[in-house]
Amino acid sequence: MIWQGRFCGTENGKGSEEAGMKKVLSYYLRPYYGRMLLGFVIKFVGTIMDLCLPWILAYMIDTVIPQGRRNDIFMWGFVMLVCSVLALTLNVTANRMASKVSRDTTETLRHDLFEKVMWLSNAKTDDFTKPSLISRLTTDTYNVQQMLGRVQRLGVRAPILVIGGILVTLTLDPVLTLVLVSVMPVTAFVTYYFSRKSIPMYNALQRAVDQFVRLLREDIAGIRVIKALSKTAYEEQKYDALNKKVVTLERKADVTMAVVNPATNLFLNLGLVFVVIVGAYRVNQGSSEVGKILAFLTYFTIILNAMINISKMFVIISRAVASANRIMEVIDVPDDLPSVSCEKLAGDEAYIRFDHVTFSYHSTEAEPDLEDISFSLKKGETLGIIGATGSGKSTLAALLMRFYEIDKGNIYIEGEDIRTMPTGRLRERFGVVFQNDTIFEDSIAENVRMGRTLSAEDIRKAIAHAMAKEFVEEAGRGYDNRVNIRGANLSGGQRQRILIARALAAQPEILILDDSSSALDYKTDAALRHELAEHFADTTKLIIAQRVSSILHADHIMVLEDGKMIGYGTHEELLERCEIYREIRDSQM
C-alpha cells in the first residue's frame, strides 16, 4: 500500500498521552529543522533589539541627558530608531517563516492522515466512525497547525524576553530583580499544573464534537425525512442535548485553563506593586536612579506580557496535544488486512470461489452475519443474489472486495487467495455499484471517469451501455452537465444509471451491482440486462437484487436468509426446491 512505507505505527496502535505530539515534532517537523533554526536565529536577534530599547532609554535619561551633549542625544536616538526598525523587520520575517513551516508541516500531516483514512479497512472506519475521521482531518489538524505557528512565534520570543529581561534588570538593580523573580516560580507552577490537567478534558471535548458532527451529518442528510415525518422537534431535542454536552465539556476545559491568565496577571502585578514600592524607597535613599526605575518598569511590563503569552501558548498546546494524539491514533493504527502467504489452487477452473466462508461484523461466532458460504463461478458467468433485508447480500460483496477480513474459510479469484493480493491490485479488477452509492458534485463525465485514464469515447460507451445516453445528451450541456451533490438534481433512476456507467467504464473483470436497478422501470431494467449480456460477456457478474426479474436469467442464483445460503441454482431449479424463492417470485410476479 502507498502509506505502508511512510508510517511507523506503535506496537498496539496507541501511544502514551504525549506520543502523538512527539511524533509530530520528531517526524513531521524534522524536514523543517533547518528553516526553523534560521527563523529562531532571526527571531532571537529581533527580540534582543527589543530588549535593548529600555536599556538605551535608561542610559540616555541617567547619563547622556544630564551631560547636556546634544550630539550624543541624537546619536543614541538614532541607535534606538535602528533597533526599532531591526526589531520590526526581523520579527515580521521570522513570523512569516514560522507560518510557512507550520503550514507545510500540517499539509504533510493532513495528507498522510487522509491517505491513511482512504486505506483503512471498513472495520477500522466503523470503529473510528466517519464523523470522528472528519473531525480529525479538520479541527484536529487545525489545532496542531495553530500550535506549531504559535510556538515558533512566541516559543522563542517570550522566553527570551523573560530571561533576557531578568538578566538586563540584574545589571540595572539586582535588588528589584530579586523582587520580580520571587513571583515567577508560582506563576510557572500554576501554568504547568492547569495545562496538564486540561489535556484529558480537551480529549473528552473532541470526542463529544465527533458525536455532534455525526448528528449534524445525519440530520442534514435526512432533512427531508425529518420534515416529512414531522420529527423536527424530536431532532431538535437530540441536537439540544448533545449541544449542551459539548458546551459543558468546553466550559469545563476552558474554565480550567482560564485560571492561568488571571493567576499569572495577579502574581506578576503583585510583583509590580512590590517593585514600585521598593523602587521608590531606593530612589528616595539614593540607591537607584529614575532612569533605571523607568527602564525596570518597562522591562517588567515586557516580562509580564511575555508570561501572559506563555500561559496562552500552553492553552493552545493543551488542545494540540489532544488533537495530535487523535491524529496519530489513526495514522499509527496497524493494518488489519495484511497480506498472507497461501498456495495457489492448482487446476481450479473456477474464476471466483468462496470456500466455507464465515464472517461476523462483531467477531461473535455465535451469530455470524454470513455462515459457511460456498460457491464457484466461471469467468463470464452471472450470479444473482436475493434475500430479505439484512440477510447478508451486501456483506458477501464487501468480503469479495476485501473491505472486511473473513473469520473462516477462503475466497479465491483465479485460484489465488485474495489475502495474498495487494488491495489496490485486487480492487482494480472490480466495477461496482453499492447501495446508496455517491454521486459527486461534478460533471456527468467526471462522475463516470472518477480520475481514471478513460477517454471521452470510453465514457460515452459506458453511458450508452447503462441506458443513460438519452437523458444525458438531452441535458443542457450533455456530458459536461453539472450534477448537484449526491445527485440531488437527478431522479433515482438517472442516478442509478450514472453509477452503473461508472462501474462499466473501465471494462472490469468483475462487476458487482448491489440493488442498482431498484429505481429502474422494468423496460429499462430488461434493456440493461441485454446490454450486459451482449457487451460484457467475459465479465463475471454478481447482481444483488430485490426483484426476481433482475436475476431471472442469471447462470446461478443464491438465496440468503439470516446469513445462510438456503438455495443455490438456476431459476427453474430454485422454483422446484426452494420454498423461500417461490414465495418471493409469487409475491412479485
Image (cartoon, rainbow, N blue to C red):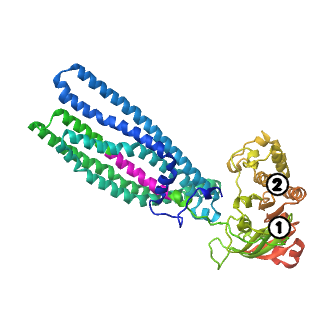
Residue 347 x/y as whole percent:
84, 72
Disc with the residue nearer the chain's start (1 vs 2):
1
* Magenta region: 307-325
Residue 153 x/y as whole percent:
41, 42
Circle number at residue 351: 1
Q: Residue 160 occupies which quadrant of the picture?
A: top left
Rounded to the nearest whole Å, what is the CA distance between mark 1 and mark 2? 17 Å
Q: Secondary structure at mark 2?
A: loop
Q: The N terminus appears in which quarter of the rendering?
A: bottom right
Q: Residue 215 occupies which quadrant of the picture?
A: bottom right
Q: Nearer the viewer, residue 347 or 104?
A: 347
Q: Residue at x 40, y 36 (%)?
A: 91
Q: Nearer the viewer, residue 133 or 176?
A: 176
For the question of whether residue 309 can be seen, the reply is yes
Tell me the crowding category of disc 2: few under 14, some 14 to 19, or many 20 or more residues within 10 angstroms, Cα based: some
* Residue under pointer 2: 507
Q: Is residue 318 magenta?
A: yes
Residue 534 x/y as whole percent:
90, 57
Tell me the crowding category of disc 1: few under 14, some 14 to 19, or many 20 or more residues within 10 angstroms, Cα based: some
Count of picture labels: 2
Q: Amino acid at mark 1?
A: Tyr
Q: Nearer the viewer, residue 334 or 431?
A: 334
Circle number at residue 305: none
> Comparing marks 1 and 2, which lies closer to the viewer?
1
Q: Amino acid at mark 2?
A: Gln
